[in-house]
Image: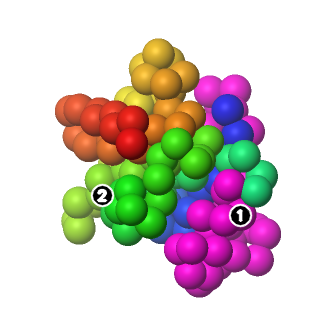
Amino acid sequence: MYFLIDENLPRSTGNLLRRYRHEAVDIRDIGLRGTKDSKIASYAQSKSLCLITGDYGFSDIRNYPPDQYSGLIIISIPKSATASFILNLIEDFLQQKELVARAPGKLVIVEPGRVRIRKT
């Protein structure tokens, strides 16, 4: 899969995704840092990238209908979470290849101990 990494995830998220044989681009590397969510979403759509983010704003299916994206993956990040905790959460998801394969066109919420997938 091809991922667009939001700025609220650790920089090392790209390396983690690549270890699992995915392509990844970080919005901080393409001049989108601090950009409005709608512009990030448009970029992901135009490049057919699966957005991975810790921003629950992208879970609003009225504004971001999952079937119009190559996947919207929301990482549920507790306030006290360390970068290591976040990366472990993402890795737990990546290890479930069948769930990763189902992400295109879906809203995926990754939480400690569970993954929820919503079609529309």
19 relative to 52, above or below = above
- Residue 2 is situated, as x and y percent measured from the top left of the image, at 70, 40
> Which of the pair 17/85 is nearer the observer?
17
Q: Earlier in the sequence, mark 2 or mark 1?
A: 1
What residue is shown at x 71% (from left), y 63% (from top)?
Answer: 43
Question: Which image quarter is the N terminus in?
Answer: top right
Q: Label 2, secondary structure: give it.
A: loop
Q: Residues within 10 Å of mark 2 (few under 14, many from 20)?
A: many
**Residue 107 percent across, percent down from the top left:** 41, 44
Residue type, label 2: Ile
Instruction: Determine which quarter of the picture holds residue 62.
Output: bottom left
The local crowd at label 1, few if under 14, some if 14 to 19, many if 20 or more residues have their Cα within 10 Å, is some
**Range shown magenta:** 16-45
**Residue type pointed to by label 1:** Tyr
The label on residue 35 is none
- Asked if one can make out residue 69 in the rendered structure from this viewpoint, the answer is yes
Say which residue label 1 marks. 43
Residue 9 vertical placement versus 49 (above, below): below
List the residue tagged with mark 2: 77
Write the residue at 78% across / 69% down: 30
**Quarter in which the C terminus is drawn:** top left
Relative to 9, 18 lies left or right = right
* Residue 52 rendering spot, x and y as whole percentages: 52, 51
Residue 86 appears in view = no
Q: Quadrant of residue 60?
A: bottom left
Q: Position of residue 97 (x, y in %)?
A: 50, 18
Q: Residue furthest top?
A: 98
**Relative horizontal placement of residue 4, taking residue 62 as reference (left or right):** right
- Horizontally, residue 103 falls left or right of residue 12, namely left
Q: CA distance from mark 2 to mark 1?
A: 23 Å
Which residue is painted at 23% across and 32% down in the image?
114
Front of the two marks 2 and 1? 1
